[in-house]
Every structure is written in structure tokens, then in C-alpha cells.
Image: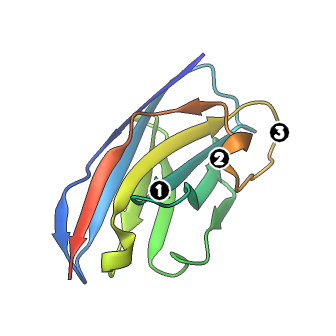
């Protein structure tokens, strides 16, 4: 079992920066993947970024590449998402997810992830 708790979402102005955190607990191995997804109203859940639990490999969705950075804080067992140059289109509920069924497989589909947090709302005003 893996537990994930997101925090950090809030109302922001376009162009600003925000950091989201995902506190993870439970049995997570170095080859498991932790990812951030987001879902805007009326849209499907979208892949944002992923990192393996050891922190050595990262992938990003095209919409956030160059603006967002995913990282692993070993001391606090968190996976953080640094979001810069925020746009109105970044408005969504952001979810943390963990995939344990594969090793070092960076899935981009929500169905490929086994555990989910409750989500945190990010709203960007234009």
C-alpha cells in the first residue's frame, strides 16, 4: 500500500511560480514511478511529469516542458513539482500518482498508475 498526500495548490497570477508537494508513504521501491497529473474541468486527466523513486530519471509532458521541474526530496519522502511561468491553461486539480506494477516504466496514462492522492487545486488568473 502507498499513501500520497498533495499540498501547495492555491490561486496564482499568470507568470508566477508555485511549488506543489506530494508526501509519499508506504512500500515504494527505487524503480517505482511517482508522477504528477492534472485535470481541468471537462477535460481528461493529463500527464504532467514523472520521476523514478530513486530520483535519477525524469520525464515531462509537452505542455510543461521547460517550465515545470519534478524532483525528489529524499529526506522528507516527498516529490515536488516546481511550476514557473504559470499560464491560465495550467489551471487544474493536480494529482500525485504512483505506479508499482512495473519497474522504471514511465507511463503517461492515468490507468497505468496504481495509487492516487486526493488532489490539490491550482488556479491561475490571467
The residue tagged 3 is 103
Q: Which residue is drawn at 67% across and 38% down?
A: 113
Residue 54 spot, x, y in % from top left: 65, 43
Q: Which residue lies furthest to the front in this view?
A: 42
Q: Note whether residue 52 is visible.
A: yes
Lower sequence index among marks 2 and 1: 1
Between tags 3 and 1, which lies in front? Answer: 1
Quarter of the image for residue 103 reads top right
Crowding around mark 2 (Cα neighbors within 10 Å: few <14, some 14 to 19, many 20+) is many
Image quadrant where one finds the C terminus: bottom left
Q: Is residue 114 left or right of residue 104?
A: left
Give the spatial CA distance, label 2 vs label 3: 16 Å
The residue tagged 2 is 110
The residue tagged 1 is 38
Lower sequence index among marks 3 and 1: 1
Residue 3 spot, x, y in % from top left: 49, 23
Lower sequence index among marks 2 and 3: 3
Amino acid at each position: 500500500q502507498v499513501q500520497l498526500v498533495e499540498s501547495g495548490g492555491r490561486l496564482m497570477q499568470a507568470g508566477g511560480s508555485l511549488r506543489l508537494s506530494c508526501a509519499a508513504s508506504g512500500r515504494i521501491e527505487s524503480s517505482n514511478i511517482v508522477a504528477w497529473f492534472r485535470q481541468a474541468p471537462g477535460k481528461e486527466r493529463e500527464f504532467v511529469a514523472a520521476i523514478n523513486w530513486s530520483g535519477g530519471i525524469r520525464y515531462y509532458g509537452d505542455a510543461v516542458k521547460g517550465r515545470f521541474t519534478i524532483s525528489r526530496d529524499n529526506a522528507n519522502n516527498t516529490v515536488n513539482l516546481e511550476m514557473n511561468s504559470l499560464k491560465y491553461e495550467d489551471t487544474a486539480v493536480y494529482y500525485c500518482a504512483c505506479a508499482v506494477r512495473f519497474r522504471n516504466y514511465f507511463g503517461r496514462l492515468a490507468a497505468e498508475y496504481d495509487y492516487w492522492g486526493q488532489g490539490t487545486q491550482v488556479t491561475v488568473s490571467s
